[in-house]
Amino acid sequence: MEEITPRRRDTDRPRGRMRKGMYILPSLFTTANIAAGFFAIIETVRGSVAEPRHLDYAAMAIGFAVFFDGLDGRIARLTHTESDFGKELDSLADVVTFGVAPALLAWMWGFHLLPSTMPAELHLKVIQLGTIACFAFLIAGASRLARFNITTNPQPSNPGRPGKKYFVGMPIPAGAGVIAAVVHFLGGEPLVSWRTSVSWLLMVIVVGYLMVSTWRFYSFKDIDFRSRRPFRLIVILAVIGASIWFFSGPALFLIAIFYMASGILWRLQWIFRRKAPPAPPPPREASLTP
């Protein structure tokens, strides 16, 4: 008898095409990340003392980019569409959006737009030092991304255990978020005093150092939205979302500063715990037998 081969069902082709189309979804969020970074650069260049709203728009664009960056990787993992192309595209996007854009914003907002009422030599020195600090931030962010791409088993120096629960060093989106949150908190109004500008310089350097450090920062990767009881998580996210919606400036500022401080506090806790003398052994109980 002639063997009859089963015909391929027509429903197999749409399913295969839909599977291939799922790989585009994470890249769309990465593209939105790049678009937000490009918009932030344009708005930063347009910013001035007379029109500080452009600097505020740039800060908000970086904030939206942080949101998009957090979604593309999570969507890729949920849909099982991770790819080498997506990883490389995400890294290149992060260099532009979370490296170049916040560095330019920090320079323009904190140094370049300083009023010329101060002594000319002091004004020039502050701008030069600020340029070096912002460039150091950019290099630190790029180095942080390069280390993240080549490291397969990251181990933070405190507590020194591998795992996905912590990042090794502050991630570059968080570093850019700190810059953007401060600018947005002040409504984009440029700094007017050389003292506050020097304080801003130190903060930019600290953020850059935290990115290249080996200190641990919480990664939020252990949060499971598919758990049986996500009620608490939903309530927390709802409160955070409502706070950002109604009080975006103070809420984002507190979130960014708290996250940056968490890594510093964890590091100090580890240092003091390591220097503390070991606890004495418990006394042995007296034997009941003579």
Image: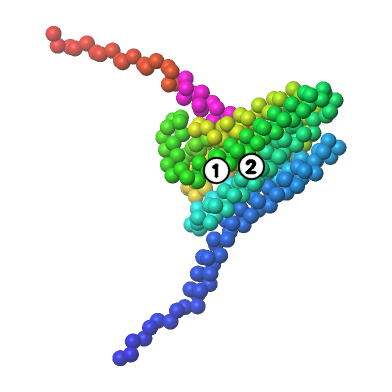
Marks 2/1 in contact by CB < 8 Å: the verdict is yes
Query: In what quadrant of the picture does the N terminus appear?
Result: bottom left
User: In the picture shown, does residue 52 fall above or below 124?
Assistant: below
Residue 233 drawn at (x, y percent): 55, 42
Residue 60 drawn at (x, y percent): 71, 43
Q: Nearer the viewer, residue 198 or 234?
A: 198
At a point 60% along the width and 41% down the height, the residue shown is: 173
Left/right placement of residue 1 relative to residue 221 reads left
Left/right placement of residue 11 relative to residue 25 reads left
Residue 170 drawn at (x, y percent): 55, 36
> What amino acid is labelled 1 in the image?
Leu
Q: Nearer the viewer, residue 94 or 232?
A: 94
- The residue pinned by badge 1 equals 145
Q: Is residue 55 visible?
A: yes
Q: Dividing the picture into quarters, in which one does residue 52 lie?
A: top right
Query: In what quadrant of the picture does the C terminus appear?
Result: top left
- Range of the magenta residues? 261-272
